[in-house]
Amino acid sequence: MKTPDLRVCCGWSMSIIFSATLVMLLIGCEQSEELAKMGVEEPISNDSPVDVPQRSAKETSEETKKQTQNVSTPETEQVEVDFSAFQDAALAGDGRKVQQAIDGGIDVNQADDQQRTALMLAAFNGHTPIVKLLLDDGAELDHRDALGRTALMFAATADNGETVELLIDAGADVNAVDTGEGFTSLMHAAAEGQLKVVQILLKHQADPTIRDVDGDTALDFATQNGHTDVVNLLTQ
């Protein structure tokens, strides 16, 4: 049985430190069975199922030319903020840069080549204030990435209880199923051993009986990964 491991791909850990210029440290990791099932090509980090944008210098240059927008600072100066920098700011939890881009009219629902939006990246790292900021500016809650995953699924992979609550309160579907392997937010949380998130999802009527394309449930993933506390909760 394979696990919906959104965080054990490559690069982008929740503990990654961003420099003042948002230079991202890319950390490689070995291809795993979990990765293969998730179909992750450009990963995020830790032990879960989400992948963050990784661009080559050429891709970044070309994308910048196409997607750079003028953003007004409080002093009304014009600075250029490209789309990739906006996503990096959301992932890093840099509220000032995110707000600056929004004030300049950037499209908060613009997605990268894997169809990931700033909302997904902010949710993945549990940056609740950024998530709220994006939602208030019209970020689409039900947008799906290339694998059919939602912002709630991204948030459910780590100890992001506050972010998960915010997304659900905003109307996120707790039982949404991705279009790749049939994983739910509950499966992601159970696979990662995120007890608090599992409790929140169950409180909001997440269905523990849903099975993925291989017939596995959230309980199966928690059992396989040795998350006894989650197993006990799901078998009550």
Image: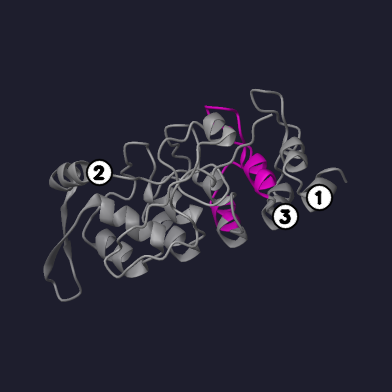
Say whether marks 1 and 2 touch (CB < 8 Å).
Answer: no
Query: Which x, y percent locates residue 55?
Result: 28, 44
Q: Earlier in the sequence, mark 1 or mark 2?
A: 2
Q: Nearer the viewer, residue 27 or 215?
A: 27
Q: Name the residue that disc number 2 marks.
A: 56
The type of residue carrying mark 3 is Leu
Q: How many marks?
A: 3
Q: Name the residue that disc number 3 marks.
A: 195
Which residue is at the far right? 236
Q: State the extent of the magenta-drawn residues as a range.
A: 164-192
Q: Earlier in the sequence, mark 3 or mark 2?
A: 2
Residue 228's mark? 1
- Relative to residue 162, is residue 5 depicted above or below? above
Q: Which structural element holds mark 1?
A: helix
Within 10 Å of the Cα at label 1, are there few (<14), some (14-19), or many (20+) other Cα atoms? some
Q: Earlier in the sequence, mark 1 or mark 3?
A: 3
Query: Which x, y percent locates residue 154?
Result: 52, 47
Within the image, what quadrant is residue 6 found in?
top right
What residue is drawn where x is 49% and y is 50%?
A: 45
What residue is drawn where x is 81% and y is 44%?
A: 234
Q: Based on the picture, tell me whether residue 172 belongs to the magenta stretch.
A: yes
